Image (cartoon, rainbow, N blue to C red):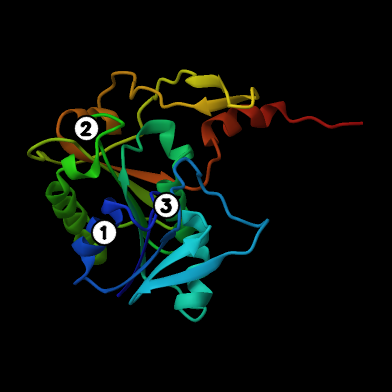
C-alpha cells in the first residue's frame, strides 16, 4: 500500500505531520507538500512557471512553489516512476472545509487531483475555536484517532469511495468525539470581508479577510454534525452536472438559424 500525502498549509504544518504519523504503519508513506501556504487555491495547477522538488527527508518533499494539485500531479513521474499511489490523503487542514467552502479549498483540491486519476482520495480538516487558534491549542490526538480509523476502513473496503469521488472529512473541535456521521454539504452563508488600505507609498490595495463560519441550520449536514461533536464525512463527486436541472431543460432545446 503506497500512500501519498499533501496539504495546503505547507510542508511545515502541524496537521501534515499528524496525518503522516496517523497512517505511517498502514503503508509506505510519501509526503509532497507546497513550500508555502496555499489556502483557498482550490484545484489549481501551475502552468506558468517551473516547479522544483526539494527533498527534506526520506520520502518527504516540498514543492517550490507548487499547489496541492501540483504536488499530487508531479509525484507520479517523480516518486512513482509513472505509476500511481494506492491512496491520496490531503490535510489535516488547520480549519474547517464545510459546505461550499470545498470549492475554495486547496485541501479538497489535492484530494480531487487524486480522484481524477482514479485513486481513492480523502481530504481531512480540523475545526478551530477561532481563525487565529494556534496549532498548539488543537486536540491533535482526537484528529489522529479519527484519521487513522477512517483510513483503515477505506483500506479494508469497509468504506468505499466511488470512482471520481472524494471523501471530505471535518473533525470537530471538541474534547471528546461522539462518533462519525455521513453527511451532505451544508448551506454556507457568505459575506464580503474585503479591507482596503494604503501602502507606505500611498498606493491602495485590498486584503481579503475571513468570513464567520455561518450556515443555515439544517439536519444531516456536515456543519450540523461537527457542531454536535461528530466527525463529518461527506462524499463528493467531481461530476458537477445538475441532473435535475438538465432533465427540466431538455424539453427546451432549440435550433439556432
Residue 18 image position (x, y, % from top left): 22, 56
Residue 185 position (above or below residue 8): above
Residue under the image location 65 percent in, 57 percent down: 47
Which secondary structure, mark 2? Answer: helix
Marks 1 and 3, the one that precedes in the sequence:
1
Circle 1 or circle 2, nearest the eye: 1
Q: In which quarter of the image is the C terminus?
A: top right
Residue pictured at 34% horizontal, 21% vertical: 214
**Upstream in sequence: badge 1 or badge 2:** 1
Measure the alpha-carbon separation of dots 1 and 2.
26 Å
Residue in the foreground of this view, choosing between 39 and 183: 39
Which residue carries the number 3 mark? 165
In space, the residues marked 2 and 3 are separated at their CA atoms by: 21 Å
Helix, strand or loop at label 3? It is: strand
Kindly tell me whether residue 221 is visible in this rendering. no
Which residue corresponds to mark 1?
17
Inspect this view and state whether residue 35 appears: yes
Dot 2 alpha-carbon crowd within 10 angstroms: few under 14, some 14 to 19, many 20 or more: many
Q: In the image, is 43 to the left or to the right of 22?
A: right
Quick one: quadrant of the N terminus?
bottom left
Q: Name the residue under label 2.
A: 225
| Image location (x, y in percent) of residue 96 | 31, 37
Q: Which residue lies furthest to the left in this view?
A: 176
Relative side of 235 to 38, left or right: left
Q: Quadrant of residue 79?
A: bottom left
In the displayed structure, does residue 193 sit left or right of residue 246? Answer: left
Badge nearest the viewer, 1 or 3: 1
Q: In this view, does 44 lie above or below 244?
A: below
Q: Is mark 1 on a helix, strand or loop?
A: helix
Amino acid at each position: 500500500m503506497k500512500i501519498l500525502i499533501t496539504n495546503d498549509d505547507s510542508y511545515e504544518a502541524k496537521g501534515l505531520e499528524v496525518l503522516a504519523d496517523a497512517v505511517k504503519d498502514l503503508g509506505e508513506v510519501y509526503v509532497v507538500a507546497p513550500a508555502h501556504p496555499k489556502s483557498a487555491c482550490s484545484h489549481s495547477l501551475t502552468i506558468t512557471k517551473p516547479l522544483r522538488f526539494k527533498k527534506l527527508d526520506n520520502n518527504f518533499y516540498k514543492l517550490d512553489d507548487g499547489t496541492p494539485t501540483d504536488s499530487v500531479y508531479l509525484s507520479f513521474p517523480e516518486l512513482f516512476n509513472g505509476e500511481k499511489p494506492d491512496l491520496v490523503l490531503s490535510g489535516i487542514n488547520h480549519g474547517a472545509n464545510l459546505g461550499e467552502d470545498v470549492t475554495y479549498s486547496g485541501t479538497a483540491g489535492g484530494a480531487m487531483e487524486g480522484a481524477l486519476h482514479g485513486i481513492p482520495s480523502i481530504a481531512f480538516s480540523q475545526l478551530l475555536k477561532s481563525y487565529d487558534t494556534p496549532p498548539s491549542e488543537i486536540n491533535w490526538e482526537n484528529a489522529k484517532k479519527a484519521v487513522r480509523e477512517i483510513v483503515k476502513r477505506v483500506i479494508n473496503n469497509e468504506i468505499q469511495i466511488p470512482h471520481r469521488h472524494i471523501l471530505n472529512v471535518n473533525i470537530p473541535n471538541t474534547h471528546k468525539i461522539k462518533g462519525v456521521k455521513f453527511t451532505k454539504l451544508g448551506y454556507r452563508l457568505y459575506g464580503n470581508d474585503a479591507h482596503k488600505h494604503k501602502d507606505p507609498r500611498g498606493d491602495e490595495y485590498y486584503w481579503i479577510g475571513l468570513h464567520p463560519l455561518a450556515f443555515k441550520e439544517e439536519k444531516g449536514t456536515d456543519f450540523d454534525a461537527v457542531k454536535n461533536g461528530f466527525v463529518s464525512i461527506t462524499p463528493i463527486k467531481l461530476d458537477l452536472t445538475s441532473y435535475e436541472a438538465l432533465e427540466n431543460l431538455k424539453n427546451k432545446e432549440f435550433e439556432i438559424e
